[in-house]
Image (tube, grey):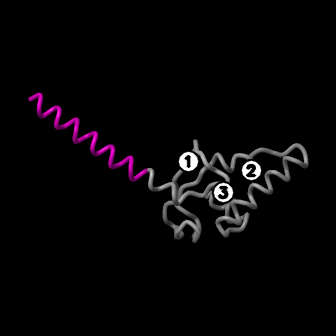
Amino acid sequence: MKYKVVAFCLSWVGLMAGLTTDVHALPSKCLQAPARIAVCPHLIYKKSALPVMSLDVREGEVICICLSDFKVLNNTAVDNIKKIAQQVSLMRIADKHQLSEQDILTLIKY
């Protein structure tokens, strides 16, 4: 009986390790800031409202979005410097993924 429990636990750990590997492979299709070097702390996965060719994602497929990189868009800029920083951040992401700013907003809100 002990051996069956040990075998079950080992198979469960092996299964979880396999799933973990697959999950780490998905963020390669993630809409995020080009300057991001650390792991995104707030990822979501959702159905893409439009195609994102730079990530090889077709409309209706699952896309990963790093919401942390877009939180500045939700904040109302109180001065011109923050407004410019928001605009530059959005433009960099749009340029990297060959999308318009409106496309990015659609992907986030859809």
Locate residue 46 relative to residue 13 in the image: left or right.
right
In contact (CB < 8 Å): disc 1 and disc 3: no
Residue 22 located within the stretch drawn in magenta: yes
Q: What residue is rendered at 91% in x and 49% in y?
A: 80
* Residue 47 image point, x, y percent: 52, 60
Query: CB of mark 2 within 8 Å of CB of mark 1?
Result: no
Q: Nearer the viewer, residue 30 or 109?
A: 30
Q: The residue tagged with tag 1: helix, strand or loop?
A: strand
The residue that appears at 27% across and 44% down in the rendered structure is 14
Give the foreground label among 2 and 3. Answer: 3
Task: Out of 52 and 36, give the one closest to the viewer.
Answer: 36
Residue carrying label 1:
43
Numbered circle sitting on residue 73 = 2
* 73, above or below 94, in the image: above
Q: Position of residue 41 (x, y in %)?
A: 58, 42
Pick the quarter of the image with the C terminus.
Answer: bottom right
Label 1, label 3: how many angstroms apart (C-alpha)? 15 Å
- Of labels 2 and 3, earlier in sequence is 3
Q: Quarter-wise, where is residue 94 in the image? A: bottom right
Q: Which mark is residue 1?
A: none
Q: Secondary structure at mark 3?
A: loop
The kind of residue tagged 3 is Pro
Which residue sits at x=59%, y=68%?
A: 54
**Residue 42: x percent and y percent?**
58, 44
Question: Residue extending furthest top?
Answer: 2
- Closest to the camera, between mark 1 and mark 3, is 3
Magenta span includes 97: no
Whole-Å distance between the Cαs marked 2 and 3?
A: 16 Å
Residue holding disc 3? 34
- Dominant SS of magenta comes to helix
